[in-house]
């Protein structure tokens, strides 16, 4: 039985609709924190002109690789081991697209900053960085369920927690990337697109 995420199963359809707006030209994509690989194997064939590189922290690669092997696609490249804080692990790029789903509340603030910094250095001019997940606005979770989720994350590990959309946007601005879109998703999630 392959590792499975119900959240990934639920959000892949809505995510596809937003990606269709932004992955409009052939190119290369780096996915950060691919998890079970459900997004990679389902989304990559829907963008056949985009060369899709999944990645995952080296110690979690064993959970990712079996699904990629079981559902190969012509444009799905071999997965790479990548922890965002490991400068030496980052691939050279450039990438036309970067995608990360439900990772910014799992990474520490410092790791999110490293992720944005390193990925933006490898993002082509005119490239797009797509971030899916729950965010706070004006310092507050948008719903009671997101507040409870935020509290549960911080109780599990004080370094985790929902990030402020404004703080994320400011970090991208430091790298010269503006907020192009902020899309509502089911279950109180958002898709933020920078470029
Ligand atoms: C909630 S899971 C989401 C996985 C997948 N993107 C999905 O939507 O099903 C969070 C992911 O963030 C990854 N992650 C956490 N910290 C990371 C780091 N420092 N560098 C790279 N990935 C990290 C985890 O390994 C995990 O795959």
Image (spheres, rainbow, N blue to C red):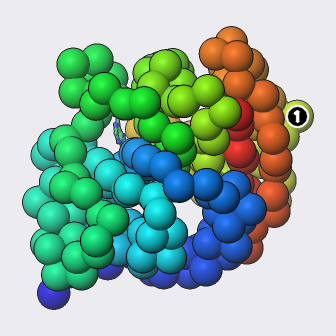
Asked if 59 appears above or below 109 in the picture, the reply is below
Quarter the C terminus occupies: top right
Q: Quadrant of residue 85?
A: top left
Per the image, the residue denoted by label 1 is 138
Judge whether residue 170 can be spotted in this image. Answer: yes
Q: Is residue 99 above or below residue 93?
A: below
In the rendered image, which quarter contains the N terminus?
Answer: bottom left
> In the rendered image, which quarter is residue 122 located in?
top left
Give left or right: position of 63 versus 162. left
In the image as oriented, which residue stretches furthest toward the bottom?
Answer: 1
User: Which residue corresponds to the image point at 61% horizontal and 47% vertical from the top-left?
Assistant: 131
Query: In terms of depth relative to the viewer, which is nearer, 159 or 101?
Result: 101
View extreme (right): residue:
138
Residue 148 seen in the current view: no
Residue 1 vs 27, above or below: the answer is below
Count of labels in the image: 1
Q: Position of residue 66 (x, y in %)?
A: 13, 72
At horizontal 52% and vertical 30% (from top left) the residue drawn is 123
Viewer-closest of 147 and 74:
74
Give the residue displayed 19% in from the left and 41% down from the top.
81
């Amino acid at each position: 039985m392959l590792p499975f995420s119900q959240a990934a199963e639920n959000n892949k359809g809505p995510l596809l609709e937003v990606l269709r707006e932004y992955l409009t030209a052939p190119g290369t994509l780096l996915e950060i924190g691919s998890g079970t690989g459900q997004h990679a194997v389902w989304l990559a064939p829907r963008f056949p002109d985009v060369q899709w590189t999944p990645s995952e922290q080296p110690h979690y690669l064993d959970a990712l690789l079996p699904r990629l092997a079981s559902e190969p696609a012509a444009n799905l490249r071999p997965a790479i081991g990548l922890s965002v804080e490991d400068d030496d692990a980052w691939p050279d790029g450039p990438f036309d697209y970067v995608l990360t789903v439900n990772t910014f509340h799992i990474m520490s603030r410092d790791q999110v900053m490293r992720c944005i910094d390193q990925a933006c250095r490898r993002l082509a001019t005119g490239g797009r960085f797509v971030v899916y997940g729950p965010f706070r606005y004006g310092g507050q979770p948008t719903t009671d369920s997101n507040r409870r989720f935020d509290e549960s994350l911080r109780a599990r590990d004080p370094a985790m927690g929902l990030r402020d959309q404004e703080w994320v946007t400011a970090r991208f601005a430091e790298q010269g990337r503006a907020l192009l879109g902020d899309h509502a998703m089911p279950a109180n999630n958002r898709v933020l697109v920078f470029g």
